[in-house]
Amino acid sequence: MFHKPLEDIFPNPPEGLDAHALEAHSMPQHIAIIMDGNGRWAKKRSLNRLKGHKAGIEAVREAIRCASDCGVRFLTIYSFSTENWKRPQTEVNGLMDLFAKTMLAEVDELDEEGVRVMTIGDLTPLPQDTREAFDRAWDQTRSNEGMTLVVAVNYGSRAEMLESIQKIADKAAAAGASGKDAPRVTEELFESGLYTTGIPDPDLVIRTSGEMRLSNFLLWQVAYSEFYVTPVLWPDFNRYEMLRALLDYQRRDRRYGAVR
Ligand code: IPE
Ligand code: IPE
Ligand code: MG
């Protein structure tokens, strides 16, 4: 269900892009975005990489509003991977600072719009103010019933899966040598140990900046997701780029291995 008339969500579509072609009944329930290309966006303008990350914030704001207005239930944004610690310390610090400031600045408006803000990933190594900003956003918005914004921060799919496997192994060890009470490893048990437990698998994964890889993002959860890669760099991604992705998604035939 769209929460606003389509001409209000997409007021000035570029020539040839028809928002009215969008169908409410086949909207993705969960969109996951690999927001890539901030550094290249900055480089093209001879700016510092952090300026690219700052410019990316406006694109995040627009993506959240657009997805929420379109009735999307879950929007996951890949913000910092477990591998991103390899970047120069100044960039890492700048990003952490940006996360804290942005979260604090945006939380009231998100709350008013009914958005529920949660995180996936291991927040323990984050600077205290960044962790507190995410914790506060969750505390303030946890009972909201609008779209859930899932911020993937210090997220790595391999670490996530290993954690779940470890929990199962610990249960098995506690069951004793006979193994009589050992848990049976099922998809449900494995998924109950992931950060994403309770969140439906993404229907649509969008990656900006043209890279054709997952970079350790939701490896288990994207088994049957549709992929959309655009050359547009993340700071240039706007509601019309989102509209292109949604229209493309709605043309796909999702077969899940069956014949139809
Ligand atoms: C994505 O942009 C943001 C993060 C990974 C935090 P990049 O910083 O990876 O931009 P490029 O890929 O260098 O252009
Ligand atoms: C993926 O982008 C991580 C995020 C968007 C947070 P990267 O820029 O880190 O990925 P690679 O290094 O190009 O694979
Ligand atoms: Mg990148």
Image (tube, rainbow, N blue to C red):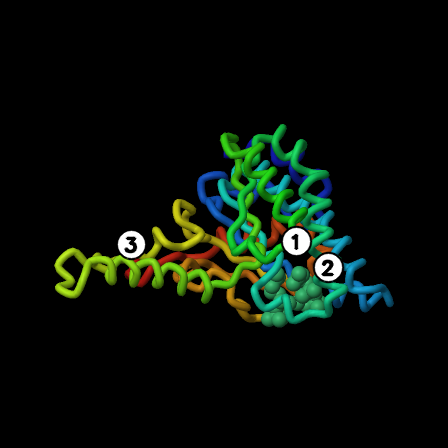
| Residue type for callout 3 | Leu
Cβ–Cβ under 8 Å for marks 3 and 2: no
What residue appears at the point 15 percent right and 62 percent down from the top-left corner? 179
Find residue 66 and report its horizontal and vertical position in percent.
Answer: 62, 41
Q: Which residue is mark 1?
A: 127
Question: For the point 56% across and 40% down, which residue is it?
Answer: 117
Q: Counting residues from the N terminus, which is met first, the one under dot 2 or under dot 1?
A: 2
Which residue in the protein does label 3 denote? 189
Residue labelled 2 has its Cβ within 8 Å of some atom of ligand 1:
no
Q: According to the image, label 2 marks what residue?
A: 93
Disc 3 to disc 2, C-alpha distance: 36 Å
- Which label lies toward us, 2 or 1? 1
Which quadrant is home to the C terminus? bottom left
Label 1 crowd (10 A; few <14 / some 14-19 / many >=20): few
Q: Earlier in the sequence, mark 1 or mark 3?
A: 1
How many angstroms separate mark 2 from mark 1 (CA)? 9 Å
Of residues 111 and 129, the one drawn nearer to the viewer in this rendering: 129
**SS assignment at label 2:** helix
Residue drawn at x 40%, y 55% as measured from the top left = 194
- Give the number of the disc on residue 212: none
Residue 101, picture quadrant: top right
Report whether the residue tagged 1 is closer than 8 Å to ligand 1: no
- Nearest the viewer among 248 and 50 is 50
Instruction: Count the marks.
Output: 3
Name the amino acid type tagged 2. Asn
Crowd tier of the residue under label 2, counting other residues whose Cα lies within 10 Å: few below 14, some 14–19, many 20 or above? some
Q: What's the residue at 34%, 51% (across, down)?
A: 192
Quadrant assignment, res 245: bottom right
